[in-house]
Image (cartoon, rainbow, N blue to C red):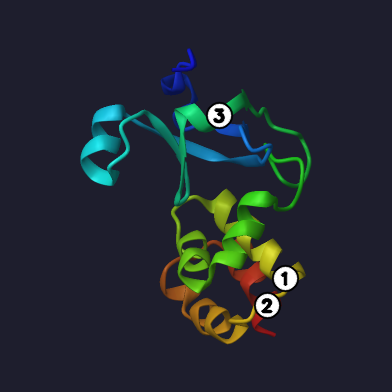
Amino acid sequence: MKRINLKKYDRKCVRITTDFGEVLDGNCEHLSRDFCECEIGIDEECLELVNFVIRKSQIEKIEIREDEGGPYGCFRDPYGTLEKESLESGFDIVEDFLFTEDKDHCMRMLRCLENEKCDYIGEVVKALKSMPKYTDDEEILKESEKIIN
């Protein structure tokens, strides 16, 4: 097993390079081996980015991202691989991003939806119309309106 201390990345903005060469940026949560074994049937420590679980054995490289000082906070780009892959996976996963308590991930998914095509845009628009029931964050609501209109 790799000698990476995943606990130090809990609740940090990270960039993970997987053993398949994927680069995923996101705010992560550490999942203990006991939790993973009991709750998701994985016998190793993991990190979770929204609803993506990355096993310790899949991590080739990991780094904590500091604030980039630009319009995307600790992120270099408006959205990335994590959001694009989620978009390809279907509405249920996209909905997880839209209604997460993590504003960064919600905003990244909204920017992805604004720029990338999906076959279920009607479902997205319907969900976004309900967004004011769940948040009063002006930035999220403004970004949602761009997609609705």
Asked if residue 102 is positioned above or below residue 106 in the image, the reply reads above
Q: Residues within 10 Å of mark 3 (few under 14, many from 20)?
A: some
- Residue type at numbered disc 3: Ile
Q: Which residue is identified by label 1?
A: 114
Q: Which residue is identified by label 3?
A: 59
Left or right, 98 with reference to 72: left
Residue 70 x, y percent position in the rendering: 78, 41
Left or right, 28 with reference to 112: left
Q: Using the rendered image of the protein, determine whether residue 64 is visible from the camera's viewpoint.
A: yes
At 55% from the left edge and 29% from the top edge, which residue is drawn?
Answer: 59
Q: Which residue is identified by label 2?
A: 147
- Residue type at numbered disc 1: Glu
Residue 87 x, y percent position in the rendering: 61, 65
Which quadrant of the rendered structure holds the C terminus?
bottom right
Say whether disc 1 or disc 3 marks the residue closer to the N-terminus.
3
Residue 29 x, y percent position in the rendering: 43, 36
Which quadrant of the rendered structure holds the N terminus?
top left
Task: Report the mark closest to the observer, 1 or 3.
Answer: 3
Hey, which residue is sitting farthest left in the picture? 38
